[in-house]
Amino acid sequence: MQREPDQGADSVDVILADWADELPDLPVSPVGVITRLQRLRNRFDDELAAVFARFDLSPADFMVVAALRRAGDPFTLSQTNLMGRLGLTSGTVSIRLARLEAKGVVTRCPSAADSRAVLVTLTELGLRLFDQVAPEHLANEDVLLSALTDDEREQLTGLLRKLLIGFEHDAVHHPAIGATLAPAHLARRARTRVGLSDRAGLLVHHVDPDGPADHAGLAAGDVLVGVGGRPLMSIVDLAGILAGPAVRLRLRVLRGETERDVTVRIKP
């Protein structure tokens, strides 16, 4: 019999409850986050597309227009720069630009400074279109978040930022401690790949010779699992501490299967 969500529960709660009945030992807790994000994304995509459709645009079209408008006067970016800002391949960007160029929203022309580069510019029509669409789009996004208070939105923003940073930055160099660190999901994969226990933390990717981390005995392959007595899962947490007045950093370090405490003197 299909279970229906109770008041105060959602469709993902039903999935989790079904698994709890069927396979109670199955570690399904990530479903509570990932599946909710996927289902919200689907809902949001439909709602956003409805607004853009009134202006004969797709959400993908508006991303291009917004990126060019955000660049400032003269609202021009190289196609390569635009690819980077949108996180898209050359072929995908070309298709979007061709569609917008046919509508008179953007123009493309060779760069006078670099014959290999193509410059993309938002036209006057494109600027007017942005001024029409942006207020409606932002108001629509605000409506979509109506279930959350301002404080809850801020909290969710922080958590999503923390999660996204781990995927956008494969390795971050921290001059204050003289080490390059990789995010927790890469640390877990690196450990399990060589048969070590599955532990989350910041993976030491590189240690600067004669730097603070080197003097403290840290080495590539170590995993930083704690700082100041608290778990360390993200470079966001570490960056917050390094931005403060501390001159020493007390780290919990996992090397192989052995944990130890290490004190790193922070470089000013």
Image: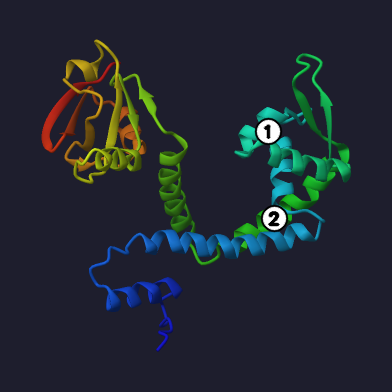
Q: Nearer the viewer, residue 81 or 67?
A: 81
Q: In screen coordinates, is 108 left or right of 238?
A: right
Q: Residue 77: where, in percent of width, then height?
A: 73, 28
Amino acid beneath label 2: His
**Residue located farthest toward the top when viewing the structure as drawn:** 210
Q: CA distance from mark 1 to mark 2?
A: 21 Å
Element marked by disc 1: helix
Q: Quadrant of the C terminus?
A: top left
**Residue located farthest toward the front when viewing the structure as drawn:** 194
**Mark drawn on residue 229:** none
| In the depicted structure, whether residue 155 falls above or below residue 201 | below
Q: In screen coordinates, is 85 left or right of 58?
A: left
Please name the residue shown 75% across and 15% down the image: 114
Q: Residue 35: where, in percent of width, then height?
A: 45, 63
Crowding around mark 2 (Cα neighbors within 10 Å: few <14, some 14 to 19, many 20+) is: some
First of labels 1, 2 by sequence position: 1
Please name the residue shown 23% across and 20% down the image: 213
Please name the residue shown 80% across and 32% down the image: 121
Per the image, the residue denoted by label 2 is: 137
Please name the residue shown 52% across and 65% down the image: 39
Per the image, the residue denoted by label 1 is: 82
